[in-house]
Image (tube, rainbow, N blue to C red):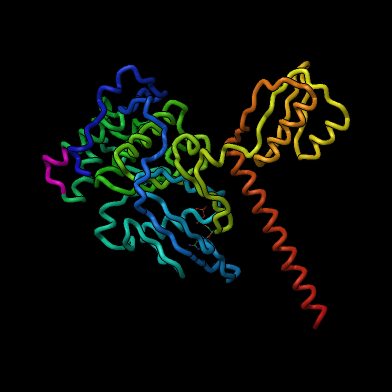
Amino acid sequence: MAQDELSPSTGAQSGAAKSSDGYSGAISSSVSSGSAPMSGEIAIEIKNLVKRYRNLITREWVNAVNDISLDVHKGEIFGFLGPNGAGKTTTIKALLGLIFPDSGDVKVLGEAPNNNAIKAKISYLPESPYFYEHMTAREIINFYASLFGLDSRERAKRADYLIDLVGLASAGNKPLRAFSKGMLQRVGIAQSLINDPEVLFFDEPTSGLDPIAHRDIRDLILHLRTEGRTLFLSSHQLSDVELVCDRVSILYRGKIRKIGRVDELVVGGNVEILVKGFKTTPALAAEITGLGAKLEQSGPDTLIIGGSDNETKNALIDLVRRGEAQIIAVTPTRRTLEDIFIETIREGEVEAGEATKFAEASTTEALEVK
Ligand code: ADP
């Protein structure tokens, strides 16, 4: 992906809304949020990754990451989600070659990430990138570009391009101490693109930003996908994740609890059947609730929510017909990624509780045997 292939979408800036910091992204807000062109090629491969740490005080071993496996396709935006302490940072550190797995294997672009040729093709954006505040955005980009060995002409060209891309063209020569969090995040993204990376790791790229800056950063992320880059995104901003990610995994206590396409996860299994003139009887109502469905009456309309499988959905529609009702709409229920996340963590908590109880029971039994 040579720089020349990455022409900045300069024209898109006009008319774009400005965030409260007064800057708007060079990327049009109309960037498609459609899913990635799946190349089928794997960019990130995690196989049975285990990483343990020893607690310095209790001396107990903690499985920070406990046997996780996943693949991220080239050109995909993958959301790596989980509450604090789930094991996200540990996994990302392993993928960046900063720590070694205790067992299992990680590969980025088909190679171990500590391989220097691979390091040159990846980049990492921390949650709060820190820059020397007396330097300007242009100087910072120039400085980092020099670390990658670009000559002065190339550096200037790259700095111009990236500063324009992230919507800082009019602030590029101002010192960073005058920059808002959103503007610093744009500098961070520009910096993460200096080496024209194929795979980017972004940690909380939209946390603490105002709504317009949020949208601009989201659009930038989507733009990076249109350039064929792969993004591995760790974030608690679930509404952003829902909008930009193709697939997500939800990590809890070092284990992947859920993984899948966002569009498939958010479509609940149920349908909402809106009917008119339903002549329900207690027997019919009992049959409907017996199928696990819920009946809600609102004036002449009745809403029936249920049917996790096709057979049940059809059975519900048959019951509606028996009640001589007119079907107005049958709509799949939709949940937010936040609903899925909370449900997944709750399930994990219940299982962990069960596991603790089980362990306690075994200990009691062992004591009794003694
Ligand atoms: P997340 O990024 O999802 O918040 P981390 O990967 O930072 O989670 O941490 C996962 C678990 O591993 C936590 O219980 C954390 O306390 C523990 N852990 C992480 N790094 C270390 C370390 N260097 N030493 C000891 N424990 C650690």
Whether residue 72 is situated above or below residue 236 in the rendered picture:
below
Residue 261: x and y, percent? 50, 43
Which residue sits furthest right?
Answer: 282
- Decide if residue 261 is on the left or right side of residue 190: right
Residues drawn in magenta: 150-156
In the image, 292 versus 337, the foreground residue is 292
Q: Quadrant of the C terminus?
A: bottom right
Above/below status of 353 relative to 2: below
Counting from the top left corner in percent of width and height, residue 167 is at: 30, 28
Residue 58 image-quadrant placement: bottom right
Is residue 153 part of the magenta span, yes or no?
yes
Residue 89 colored in magenta in the image: no
- The residue at the point 51 percent across, 67 percent down is 52
Instruction: Say how many tags the image has.
Output: 0
Instruction: Kindly identify the residue that appears in the image at 34 percent across and 47 percent down.
Output: 39
Q: Position of residue 2 (x, y in %)?
A: 19, 43
* Left or right side of 336 for 214: left
Residue in the foreground of this view, choosing between 262 and 148: 262
- Side of 333 where 9 appears, left or right: left
Residue found at x 38% / y 48%:
201
**Quadrant (top left, top right, bottom left, bottom right) of the N terminus:** top left
Which residue is at a point 22% across and 38% down the rendered structure image? 139
| 357 to 303, vertically: above or below | below
Q: Position of residue 44 (x, y in %)?
A: 38, 55
Type of secondary structure dominating the magenta stretch: helix
The answer to whether residue 197 is left or right of residue 275 is: left
